[in-house]
Amino acid sequence: MHFLYSIGLFALAGIIVPLIIHLWNVKQGKILKIGSIALLGESSSTSSKSFKINDWLLFVLRCLLLVLLAFALAQPYLKKIVSARSKNGWILVEKNNFPRVLKTHQKTVDSLLKKGYEIHDFNVGFKPLNLKDTVLNETKQVNTLSYTALFSAANQFVPPGAKVYFFADHHLNRFGNELPAVNYKLNRVPLKQSDTLSNWIATYAGKKYEAKSNPSNTTYQALNSSDEEPIRVAIHENSGTTDRKYLIAALKAIESFTKRKIIINAAAGKASIGFWLSDNPVSTDFRSSIAPDGTLFRYEKGKLVASASFINLEGRQIKLSKRIELDQQAEKIWTDGFGNAILTKNKTNNLNIFHFYSRFNPQWNDLVWDGLFVKALMPIVIQDKKSNDFGFEDHPADQRLVSQNGLIEQNKTEIEAKTIKNEPLGNLFWVAAFLIFTGERILSFRKKPNDVKN
C-alpha cells in the first residue's frame, strides 16, 4: 500500500487524546456510616486518582477511529498491474481510407476481428466502425489533425497496454516534431504506395525555389527569377571612422554567395535593414527610412570594458579586446567567453532591433578578419519570417514517408510503465471510519455510571 500524501499520517499523533482521557480517571470518595467517631481524629479531605484504563473497548474504538482518519487523509492507493492480454485490441484507420485498407489488407483485418479487435475511426472521438462503413455515401472529410496529436488523444480511449494496429499512409507531414508517449502497444501498418512525384514553389527570404518530393526525400532548387526584390541596406557612421568599409565588404560577399542583389543607401525606397554605426542615438529620419517589420542594427553606447576574452560564434572563438557593458536583460545572440552579451535582439514598434556591444573595428575585436563575419551577418541581412520551416514546411504535396523504425521502439518503455494503474483506497477508509464512529457513539451513550452502594 502506498500513500499519495504521507504527511497525513502525522494525524496519528491524535491517538494521545483518548489515551489521556481514559488514563486520567478521578474517583469520588465513598461515604461510610459508623457507630462512633470517638477514635477518629481530624483529617483533611483527600481524593484518589487512578491511572488505569477501565473501558478497553471504548478506548480501542476511539484510537482505531483516529487511525482510520489519518490513513484516509494520507490517501492510500494500491499499484495494480493491468494485463494487456485481458483487453481487446484496436484497429485504427481513417474512415476515408477504410475501403482501401480492406482492399489491400483484408486477411489481416479479418484475422484481428476474429481475435476480438475493434475497428475505430482515427479521428476525434475514435468512433467505432464496421464493415458497412466501407461504402461511403457521405462527403469525404479530410482529417487536418496531426497523427501525433491523435496518438496522444487515444490514450484517453484505448485500454492501457492494449495492442493497436494503425493502418495509414504515414506521410511525414502528418507527424509532429516529437513522437508521443502512449500507454498502448502501437503497431504501424503502412499502406502500399506507388512511386509518386510532386512539386511546388517555395519562397525563402524573397527567393523562389522549386521543391520536388518523392516518398524518400524532398529537394529544393533555386529559380532564377528576374522579379526578385533586391535587399536595400542603409548605413550611417560617424565621420572619421572606418567601420563602414568592413561592413560593405561583408555585404558584397553575401551578395556574391546568395545571388541576391544588395543596394546600399538607395536614393528611393525603404531599406529592409539599417546599420547605425555610431555612438549617438538613432535619428528619427534614419529610423523612418527602414520599412515596417524591417531590421535595425545599432551600436550601443555605455561603459567601456577592456576584455581579454573572445566572441563565441559557430563553435569558434574570435578574439575580443573591448566591449560595452550591458545594463539590461535581452535575448542574447552572441556572447563572450564569460557569457556577457555581445549582440542582443528585441522587437520594438514593428522593428527588429539588434544591439551590438562592440564595433566593426579591429581595435575592438578580430571579427572583421574572420570568415565567420560574413556567415554571422547573413541571417541578419537576409531574414525570413518562416526561416525555421524552410525545407521542413508542412506542405500537402510532400510525399516523404516516416521510417518504419522508431515510433514503436521509442514508446516501448512508456507502454510498460503505463500498464501499472493506481487504485485509490481512500473511500474504504472513510466508510470504515464512519462505521467505527457510529459504534463508538452507540457504546458511549449506552454506558451508564456505576451506582455507589452504601
Image (cartoon, helix red, strand yellow):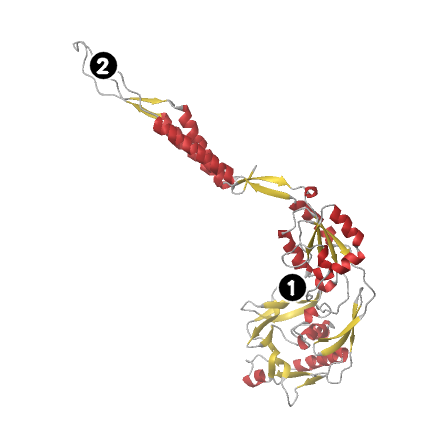
Looking at the picture, how far across and down is residue 305, in whole percent? 58, 69
Please indicate, yes or no, whether residue 9 appears anywhere in the rendered image.
no
Looking at the picture, how far across and down is residue 245, in whole percent? 69, 82
Which one is closest to the eye, mark 2 or mark 1?
2
Q: Decide if residue 293 is on the left or right side of residue 408.
A: left
Q: Using a 10 Å C-alpha cutoff, classify the residue at mark 1 as few (fewer than 14 neighbours), some (14 to 19) or many (20 or more).
A: some
Quarter placement of the C terminus: top left
Mark drawn on residue 32: 2
Specify the amino acid type for callout 2: Leu
In the image, farthest residue toward the right: 195
Image point 63% across, 59% down: which residue? 124
For residue 440, what is the image quadrant? top left
**Location of mark 1 (residue):** 337
Mark drawn on residue 155: none
Specify the amino acid type for callout 1: Gly
Looking at the picture, how far across and down is residue 93, in whole percent? 71, 57
In the image, farthest residue toward the bottom: 267
User: Reading the chain from its start, which is encountered first: label 2 or label 1?
Assistant: 2
* Image position of 34 with respect to 390: above or below: above
Image point 26% across, 19% down: which residue? 29
* Image position of 214 with respect to 417: above or below: below
